[in-house]
Amino acid sequence: MGSSKPRLLVVEDDGLIRMDLVDMLSDRGYSVEEATTADEALVVLEADLGFTAVLTDIDMPGSINGLGLGNIAHERWPTMKIVVISGRYSPSAGVLPPGAKFLSKPISERVIEQTLGELGL
């Protein structure tokens, strides 16, 4: 039976944090791709429509930040699940894309698992 786990895109400009997230999610059986900026993430998402969810940091270099990426992803791919992550900001409810989850850094494995479970992943 093909019970393959959802494909996730991790968007984080800090290499160590990105590597930790990718490893943590891969260890749980998810297929994980990565991008270092929101601009790069949009290119990846437009080229490959197979992603189920985006986990994105807010504060990154480039023309858009993680909140912008989340809102664009929600508009273009309404079924995509979005998790916004930050160690600096705590966005108010109206700023996050509809249905998005917010996680504050540092993130524990338990919190990641619980959040993905809440999103049905």
Image (cartoon, grey):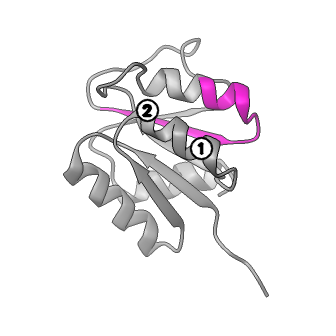
Residue at numbered disc 2: 38
Q: Determine the secondary structure under disc 2.
A: helix
- Name the quadrant containing residue 39: top left
- Residue 93 x %, y %: 56, 16
Q: Magenta stretch?
A: 72-86
Q: Does residue 46 belong to the magenta stretch?
A: no
Identify the amino acid type marked 2: Ala
Residue under the point 65% across and 48% down = 119
Q: Which mark is residue 45?
A: 1
36 or 58, which lies in front?
36
115 or 47, which lies in front?
47
The answer to which of marks 2 and 1 sits earlier in the sequence is 2
Is the residue 94 above or below the residue 10 in the image? above
- Residue 42 x %, y %: 54, 36
Is the residue 27 above or below the residue 60 in the image? below
Residue under the point 47% across and 58% down = 33
40 or 30, which lies in front?
40
